Image (cartoon, rainbow, N blue to C red):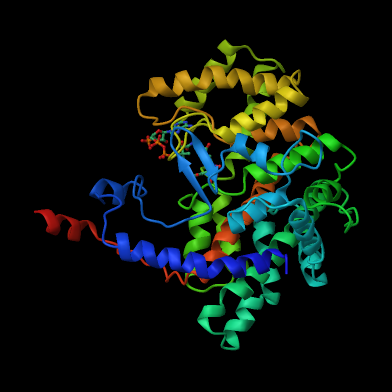
Amino acid sequence: AGSLKARISELIPQKQAELKDLKVKYGSKKLSEMTVDMAIGGMRGANALLWDLSLLDPEEGIRFRGYSIPELYEVLPSAVKGGEPIPEAMIWLLMTGEVPTEAQVNSLTEDLNSRAALPEFVERILDNCPRDLHPMSQLSIAVNALQRDSIFAKAYHDGVHKKDYWEPTFEDTLNLIAKLPLVASKIYRNVFKDGKVAPFDPKLDYAHNFSNMLGYGSSEEFTELMRLYLVLHADHEGGNVSAHTTRLVGSALSDPYTSFAAAMGGLAGPLHGLANQEVLRWIVHMVEHLKTKNPSKEQIAQFCHETLAHGNVIPGYGHAVLRKTDPRYVAQRNFALKHLSHDPLFQTVSNLYEVVPKILTELGKVKNPWPNVDAHSGCLLCHYGLTEADFYTVMFGVSRSFGVLSQLVWDRALGLPIERPKSMTMESIRKMFD
Ligand code: NMX
Ligand code: MLT
């Protein structure tokens, strides 16, 4: 009683009834037209998925269970007075749609901490990965290995009734979310440091343990940054590649580990989560190329034109849905203004914000010239010494587990079916209209 699981269990009949009502009232209504262009063009603009945890407005940006990012600061508890929201509170909000009390947040921290240890064989697998295997590949390997202990897979094997699918899905979800900081820290310490991970402290919260295990826990500011980072990257409605992959793979009743590992394959793409790595590498390359830590706006503009002339994208800019500056970018910018306003890398990131949108607009084809979440995260991490860009997408992945796995619990609770849209050949499309 009082636990997250108990609360979800209480909410399920209500939500099932809501879905039934939606189907009865609006089941045959059209959400959008599907054109040939949309089928060819990555299904842009197709309202084709049900996803209850968050909704992206092209102009305003993300709302998590109805709350904008500034509103999250108002309603969610923080560990430091006036500081960043606590990730556990975000998990609770995403899972239930309700703002948790402090007691609920503490009970979730305790629950997660009791699940955080890794099986020894998974630690060994990570220790045996070559250092030049990309951290995202190591993350997928570790998550796939954790699948050995999937409670859902075992329950399915043992013939669990479909009305109970949500429960082992929830157990796997919480176990996986709890273990990800240690998985990520082990990858970081093995690839970039001495391979030693600071011991897990069951008295600390999720983000504090994460920053300790990465090796940055002595900085309270870094721990606050982790809280912000973990909250901001948690969910971005259902159509982005990592969310959609989790939904798709999970719809075949693949367990949460297998579904999430697949999603991490998607997050590892440079047009999706890997963009945070690409942004920093691109800025570092620019600074080296220009031989100055403080490139002028003219120099930055010149470098952008060169990037585009080579047929490359400007990483961290543009979005498939957003048409304004990403509020997750703004939240990170506010953090920078508060804690590190004189950092030269932040100055460059700010100058890019002034220069890039105009250049992209001039191309005439870019639908959104404004920065997204990935344009900012690297410069914050760098400020505290976490300069290893190849690791950044792993941190994104830790956070993304909150949203996509919480939705997966609801997918099973609501009995959503296997996902299987119809595809068409070029010939069949022609025949349809000729
Ligand atoms: N730099 C250069 N060209 C761009 C950019 C950019 N930042 N953004 C879009 N374009 C181009 C795009 O490549 C396409 O060109 P073409 O017709 O020659 O293929 C054209 O503009 C139209 O694309 P859009 O419809 O504006 O964008 P789309 O919805 O297809 O793609 C992104 C969205 C995010 C993939 C795209 O803006 C991009 O590649 N951005 C850079 C990578 C990035 O920052 N990704 C991170 C997204 C956030 N996340 O974490 O996942
Ligand atoms: C995300 O956070 O998933 C990205 O902004 C990409 C997207 O929403 O398409």
Question: In the picture, residue 96 is in which quadrant?
Answer: bottom right
Q: Residue 170, percent across and down?
A: 63, 69
Judging depth in this view, the residue of 383 and 206 nearest the camera is: 206
Q: Residue 317, percent across and down?
A: 51, 31
Judging depth in this view, the residue of 252 and 31 nearest the camera is: 31
Above/below status of 332 relative to 423 = above
In the rendered image, the residue lying farthest to the left is 434
Determine the quadrant in which ligand 1 lies: top left
Above/below status of 394 relative to 72 = below
Residue at figure coordinates x 46%, y 20% from the top left: 359
Question: In the picture, residue 428 is in which quadrant?
Answer: bottom left
Lateral position of residue 295 relative to residue 366, left or right: right
Task: Let me know if residue 264 appears in the view.
Answer: no
Q: Residue 119, percent across and down?
A: 80, 71
In the rendered image, the residue lying farthest to the bottom is 158
Residue at figure coordinates x 49%, y 28% from the top left: 370
Judging depth in this view, the residue of 155 and 356 nearest the camera is: 155
Task: Let me know if residue 367 appears in the view.
Answer: yes
* Quadrant location, the C terminus: bottom left
Q: Residue 289, percent across and down?
A: 65, 21
Above/below status of 1 relative to 287 = below
Residue at figure coordinates x 45%, y 25% from the top left: 309
Lateral position of residue 161 relative to residue 93, left or right: left
* Quadrant location, the N terminus: bottom right
